[in-house]
Amino acid sequence: MYKNALLELRQSLDFYQNECGLYPVLYFYGLGNGVLAKALLQNEHLKFLVIFERDLGLLWSIFHCLDFSKELRSDRLLLIADYNDERLFSFVRAEIFLQYARTYFLTMQCAYYQKDREDFERVDALLAENLNQAMLFFGNDSEDALLGIANFIHNLPEFTSRPTIGALIHTYKKRFPNALIVSTGPSLTKQLPLLKEVQKRVFIIAADSAYPILMREGIRPDLVLSLERISFTSEFFKESFEGDEKVLFVLKSIVCPKTLQYLGERNFMGINGGASFDALLRLRDFPLFSMGPSVANFALHLALLLEFERIFFIGQDLAYGEDYRSHPQGYLYGIHDLDEAGERKENLRAPAYGGVGEVRTSFIWQVFRRNLEEVIGIAKAKIYNATEGGARINGTVEKPFSECCVEFFTQNKPSPVPLSILNSKKQEEILLRACHKLHYFIKVGEIFVQKLKTLHEEITQILMQVSLLDLESEKLRLYKASIEKLDALKNCVEKDEGFECLGIILSPTLMQFEFNLAPLFVKQVRSTQEALEKNELWVSRHLALVEEFIRLALAQNETIRTNITPLEEEIKKRGFEKYLLKIKEKNA
């Protein structure tokens, strides 16, 4: 196992003590003789040591020589012996692992494990992929959040006069046993002829991108779902079709206003997302609904909410098909999603449908697939994957679409039923409450900005003092004072009323900041000069965070002011102008 065990142990310990002494989490492929693991766990800074070791015989031998009972009981030592199922890697989403995701690296314990190089690379890729997906979950673009806020405020008056999710549940819950979710993977084309035959015997929930494809084939979905805030997906609704009056379009409340414009007089409704700006308004008649990261995930959540007994997927490839195809024939934006060189944008691999071999996929499809698997894992309904292609979705029953049709689609579904809408009094109450909240958010946002500006000025003054000092100990003292003020900001910011109002746009920035700060946190210093440099960098990064918070807070206030006009005009139109004036006066 080792050429020179003592020498290799000394070299490893030197490296980890000098370079990784502050790391809260370390990852190893292989336990080796266990001595290095035992030594590293003496470091109080190391909260978790994660080791992948398949050889149970080796573990048995080591446990007879070294006592790891204390480390195992406290969960500081995580030994993973069976890790064939890629879902096991989701443990890295726990806070301590995620917080230090940017410090991740996997070490092969010793040369003995070179024989398992391929497995080592697989484990390394899955860990990195799961960490990246977990970081993505917290968002990475505050500008997207601002766009969602703008769309939500702009759309609110229209959605208020449309059916609510309560009406949808009341009408469709347990109304029919079978729901079919139609997505636009490359395999969809081969399923369309059979779907056309059985469409009257299954409740069809279609992705926005599938809507024009189905309608042109003479297939009318019952529900069409859309959740993107950009105009890219609005174009799916530009063309209308015969039979549209029997389709209900279910939209996330932050969709691009162009979507509502294209839908015109067609039947549509809005649903509030589970972690969006709309949640802050606390509109009781528009409760929050978890949707997931894609329209197919949205469809699954909705089908489960409506308590269908069986849910079927077709077109849910989540992988590239033949000739690099990413979408079916008839897809609005073409069948290929390639880079400028004509190659797949990404070249990741996933287990294939049917369990034999692998297929090529992308990072975002992996995110969608894993989210589906998490929901399916706790679902009460029986869920079938009848895609007959693409990636395997763990937890589903893989069954050919033709067999599903014969076995389950045996009775005609009920005719569509119109959904009720809120009465005028309820609508007006929602409009006025929302308007009050939005003006209040502007007021509190201004107060929050002033707090941040005051803190920024205090830190700037301290840094000016540091620049005038020669004594290193005095510089360190002032840096410490700055860090205490900045830490206090991060500790209290989530309790601040302003942060609640601004949380949707500030949270992605704060989380990504923390991820990126981790490598600096674990950096060890060996001299006073290095300590000064680390402290200076720590303070300057936090000062930049305060500046970004100020920019985003001002941007949100401007977004509200710019997009609140349709709401205020609707309030005036309904004869409540005097209430609108009172709202503005109260929040001036």
Image (cartoon, rainbow, N blue to C red):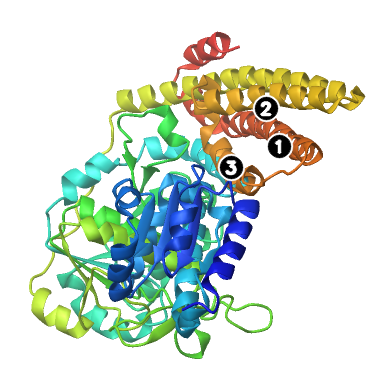
**Up-down relation of residue 459 to residue 190 (above or below):** above
Mark 3, secondary structure of its residue: helix
- Going by the numbered disc 2, the residue's amino acid type is Ile
- Going by the numbered disc 3, the residue's amino acid type is Glu
User: Label 2 crowding class (10 Å Cα cut-off): few <14, some 14-19, many 20+?
Assistant: some
Marks 2 and 3, how far apart at CA = 15 Å
The answer to whether the residues at label 2 and label 1 have Cβ atoms under 8 Å apart is yes
Marks 1 and 3, how far apart at CA = 11 Å
Q: Nearer the viewer, residue 419 or 168?
A: 168
Residue 208 in sight here: no
**Up-down relation of residue 194 to residue 421 (above or below):** below
Q: Residue at x 19, y 77 (%)?
A: 198
Q: Nearer the viewer, residue 49 or 568?
A: 49
Label located before the other in sequence (2 or 1):
2
Q: Position of residue 458 (x, y in %)?
A: 75, 18
Mark 2, secondary structure of its residue: helix
- Going by the numbered disc 1, the residue's amino acid type is Trp
Q: Identify the mark at residue 483; answer none if there is no mark.
A: 2
User: Label 3 crowding class (10 Å Cα cut-off): few <14, some 14-19, many 20+?
Assistant: some
Q: Which residue is mark 1?
A: 538
Mark 1, secondary structure of its residue: helix
Label located before the other in sequence (2 or 3):
2
Q: Identify the mark at residue 514; answer none if there is no mark.
A: 3
Q: Position of residue 426 (x, y in %)?
A: 31, 25
